[in-house]
Amino acid sequence: MKLSDVIKSKGNAVVTLSPDASVADLVALMAEHNIGAVVVSADGHHIDGIVSERDVVRGLAASGHGIVDATVRELMTGEVVTGTPEDPIEETAHVMTDKRVRHIPIVVNGELAALVSIGDVVKYRIDQLTDERNHLLGYLHT
């Protein structure tokens, strides 16, 4: 099982935002799309960073409500953990746990191709286990 399987089931749409956008714009975008992280990209294809709800909360704790006027560049994580569609799902789950990240941008030929969250990985695995269980029960009852 590879990340490409997760991407097939969830889709490859990725919400991006310019590093020069305000944190207020970021928060509005996250609320609009009901997402927990946004890939920061000046051109929508290359990754400059990633910014999550956790980054916003830390910014609030450090700077107070004035953080909403800051730029996304000031909050974003610049060293982004990335993956590829060929990465094994189980390995990716371990990387996410070890590195304490909940979102991994998927890169193909140096460009942003998708975004996978820990929730996507868990949902895919649960769906797969449910299907396996149902197949086994069907086998036992025939």
Image: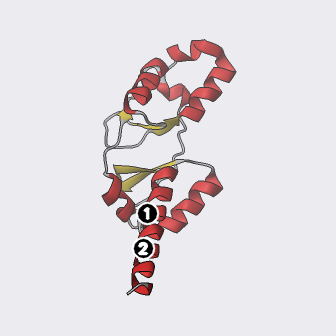
| Quarter of the figure with residue 35 | top left
Q: Secondary structure at mark 1?
A: helix
Q: Position of residue 105 (x, y in %)?
A: 43, 49
Is residue 61 shown to the viewer in this render?
A: yes
Q: Nearer the viewer, residue 16 or 3?
A: 3
Is residue 109 shown to the viewer in this render?
A: no
Q: Residues within 10 Å of mark 1 (few under 14, many from 20)?
A: few
* Residue in the picture at 47% in, 24% down: 27
Q: Position of residue 120 (x, y in %)?
A: 45, 53
Report the amino acid beneath label 1.
Answer: Asp
Q: Secondary structure at mark 2?
A: helix
Q: Is residue 84 left or right of residue 64?
A: left
Please state, as top left, top right, bottom left or bottom right, where the N terminus lies in the image. bottom left
Residue highlighted by disc 1: 127
* Residue in the picture at 68% in, 22% down: 61
Residue highlighted by disc 2: 134
Q: CA distance from mark 1 to mark 2?
A: 11 Å
Q: Establish if 93 lies above or below 134.
A: above
Q: Position of residue 55 (x, y in %)?
A: 58, 32
Q: Position of residue 80 (x, y in %)?
A: 51, 46
Report the amino acid beneath label 2.
Answer: Asn
| Quarter of the figure with residue 135 | bottom left
| Quarter of the figure with residue 5 | bottom left
Q: Residues within 10 Å of mark 2 (few under 14, many from 20)?
A: few
